[in-house]
Amino acid sequence: MPANIFRLITFLGFILFYFSTVNAQSQNEYKRVYLSGEDAGSQVYWDFMVSDGRKKEQWTKILVPSNWELQGFGSFNYGLDYKKSDRKVSDEIGYYKHEFEVPRAWKKQVINLVFDGAMTDTEVKINGEIVGPIHQGGFYRFSYDISNYLEYGSTNLLELKVSKHSANESINKAEREADFWIFGGIFRPVFLEVLPENHFTRIAVNAKGDGDFEALVTLNETPRSAEIHVQLFDQITAEVLGDFSQQVESDSVWLSHLFPKIKSWNPEKPILYNARFSLLQNNKILYQKTEKIGFRTVELRAKDGIYINDVKVILKGVNRHSFYPTTGRALTEANHLEDIMLMKEMNMNAVRMSHYNPDERFLDLTDSLGLFVLDEVTGWQDAYDTVVGPKLIRETVLKDANHASVIAWDHGNEGGWDFKNEFAFHQFDIQKRPIFYPWLNRNSIDTKHYPSYDSPEGRLDKSGDVFMPTELLHGMYDGGLGAGLDDFWKKYSANPLFAGGFLWMFSDEAVKRDDLEGMLDSDGNNAPDGLLGPYREKEGSFFTIKEVWSPIQIAAFDPSISFDGKISVSNKYLFSDLGSCKLAWSVEKIDAWKETRKLYSGSIALPTIKPGDSTQIDLKLPSAWSEGDVLKITAIGINGEELYTWSEAIRKPREGNANYFYDRISLGKKPITVRESSIDIHISAGDKIFVFGKEYGNLQLVKVGRRIINLNQATQPEDQSYTAQKVTWKQLKDGAIQIQSSYDSYPKTLTWTIFDTGELRMIASEPDSVAMLQGLGFTYPEEKVKTAKWIGKGPYRVWGNRLKGVEFGLWQKSYNNTMTGYSFEDLVYPEFKGFLANFHALLLETEQGSIEIRSETPNLCLGLFKPEFPEDAAEGTKPVLPQSDLSFLYQIPPMGTKFHKGSEIMAPATSNAIAEEHVSPMVLWFRFD
């Protein structure tokens, strides 16, 4: 036989064998058939009726999966409504019907009906027969073998009775009387598992970071002369990295093997593999299922820390509710992906599932994109009983145990546990992951909630246990989160027992109420705790966290003071060196109020800086870099992503303003005249008239032609009082008019100079010492304001303990009156009103004309009108504000939290640093057009 014919026959034989094998595998592969949509983005209509509330007792259609309240049925309740006499706690029941076809070919298969989540007690019927006990618990996967209830080759009827509240009182206490929205319905997918006669009932994997692999495989029955074959595939190349087999001698088989070629999983390099488990009998595939796994080792070392793959880790995390305003807890792939990408954009490496386990797809994405996960069994502040508790723990572990991202279990929250139920974690989790009790010190880890800055409890400093608050700071409205984080993180990180923390909370939990004309309802101040709005609008704290938690940190630099282009770079990654990272820089020019232009740019590849190390980097700036106004430095991470961009002013305000407005050589000279009355002084320069009061020497009014600009200098400094001792005026040799005032306290002297260009200069002597809200202010009618441009830090406002996350440059925003986390119907970020740091210049466009104010004083903050706070905001989230509409301040107040108020508790390090900084006289220039 010719060689080429032989090769052809051999090839055709291989192809025939290949396709016959693939066909055999496909018939015996694990198979899902969805009866509902796969998520809230692909919902399917079922028949539905609700017992009470909107559309009660009307058979109609509903989309599944969904929460029925968001589909126009039943009634809305927040979990704390049971405490309120004016609220009715709805306890409606939802009735579902759905018909589905079952092929005759499934006759010899095992068919499981699986629910990924239904709230809460669920009775299931197939073709009129109850298929098993009512499932209780609203956030868990449960299933029934319905093989014997089906009519094969025919249409089958699924009927469900879903009770919003449980017959088990402990479930109601744990889930339904909690500080979050309480919904009803089938909110996660419903599907059929179509399995061959012989199949696995569970595959539990323990794949360690060194390649040591073990698994527990259970079978529905034990076939004779069978073996389990395991193959490990590279997920990208499909290369086989190893395989092994184990004889089946019972329905519970332990497997073990060493895969030396693997790379371990971590959130910086989330490497995953496909492990294919095959049940073989006489080389025939009876069943096959593939698990996506990552190799990693989790250890909680008492009196030391949390270790992943023998690396001590710091968790930079946030608490996340599974929630979206228009769909409640029924989420889409896009929802999960958006949330995870936003967390990673903030340089987070961890997320806590508060207060229930998440959708399967969310964990798929945290595995592949890289986040540590604390997976939680519900129990807000009350526990499941010892009957239902172990069952729900079992369901949690069975669903989520093989996800590499899940590194620990949370057993309830803030007292929502019964220690007698803990055994179930140990019984079902073969990885023996740590078990946390959020806010409790137990199992060698202290997870205390909302510790203060100075931690007076002494638990971090004295207990000797690993310290990791599972709720840290608090984001009510604009409180906490970014405010205080830098101080907290620096202090806590200095202690070797610190293992990180989880901010409360990711996004505002405001539901869109169709029964309230589409209003977004956060149940007052119960649910607006996020650093993002309900539709994931970014608040200022988002960017503070992004900077504080950047895995590449650069030391503070000030290009305006003897800067040589060298900076210190630190590696805050846990597992990665900086050999693939770089710094990009640019020098930019501010062209008055028009634009910012890039003059120079470049990048520097970073050396192999190991985690925890630092080194000096020369940016190699061009010799003419100081011609610019702004120096920006961007850290580029291990995946080519922007970690953070720092930008600073190349000049102090006096020199900077001369450079920004270089074209303003002459405004033209105008004749100056003075008219004095018994109460005021009118000074005219061309078409402009400036009115000053004689009692305090304060600017009271400006006229430009026929237009009045109602800018009025306050007669008292901010947060202080003085008595005017003397007010005089005189004309200088150059024709300018000077008004001088003296006071018995700050500022001891105040001098206004009106130049023949129509510009004004104000000089206030420096304070002897700096107090909170030290400075001067002006009033102006807020309703007249259109837009503001400014040169300084932006675009977000700052607080005394939230100075990071803003960068120097030219910024602009239109007027808005957003109350952070509250103005949901008109939520605009950045907020218009608030403090702006490192103020150089302001251009306020108003209905009366433009007001331009420039500074010569370093480190001033501008108070741009007074933010409003919701009436039900906690005291700590309503700091004392200036009296004035426009204020110029040496020191601004910190922002507190729901639980903490005042700089002593929230941020003494930042506040003291500002107070101790050298201050100089306040010099401001004014121009009106």
Image: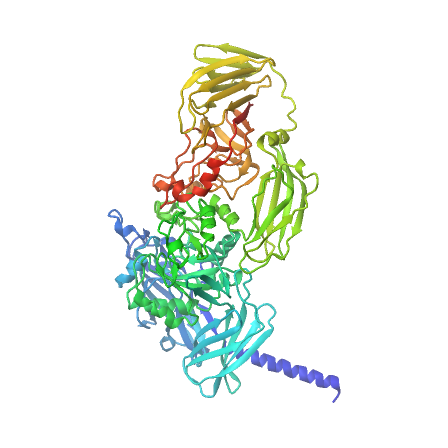
Q: Quadrant of residue 262?
A: bottom right
Q: Can you say which quadrant of the picture contains the C terminus?
A: top right
Q: Is residue 330 visible?
A: no
Most distant residue in the right direction: 2
Q: Position of residue 315 (x, y in %)?
A: 47, 57
Q: Is residue 469 left or right of residue 665?
A: left
Q: Position of residue 910 (x, y in %)?
A: 46, 41
Q: Position of residue 271 (x, y in %)?
A: 55, 65
Front-lying residue, 587 or 842: 587
Q: Is residue 479 left or right of residue 370?
A: left
Is residue 87 shown above or below 794?
below
Question: Total of numbered circles in the picture?
Answer: 0
Which residue occupies 53% across, 65% down? 265
Q: Position of residue 45 (x, y in %)?
A: 41, 61
Is residue 11 shown above or below 392?
below
Most distant residue in the front direction: 462
Most distant residue in the bottom direction: 1
- What colour scheme does the image use? rainbow
Q: Quadrant of residue 168?
A: bottom left
Is residue 639 shown above or below 862?
below
Front-lying residue, 258 or 116: 258
Q: Is residue 255 left or right of residue 562?
A: left
Q: Is residue 332 visible?
A: yes
Q: Can you say which quadrant of the picture contains the N terminus?
A: bottom right
Front-lying residue, 176 or 303: 303
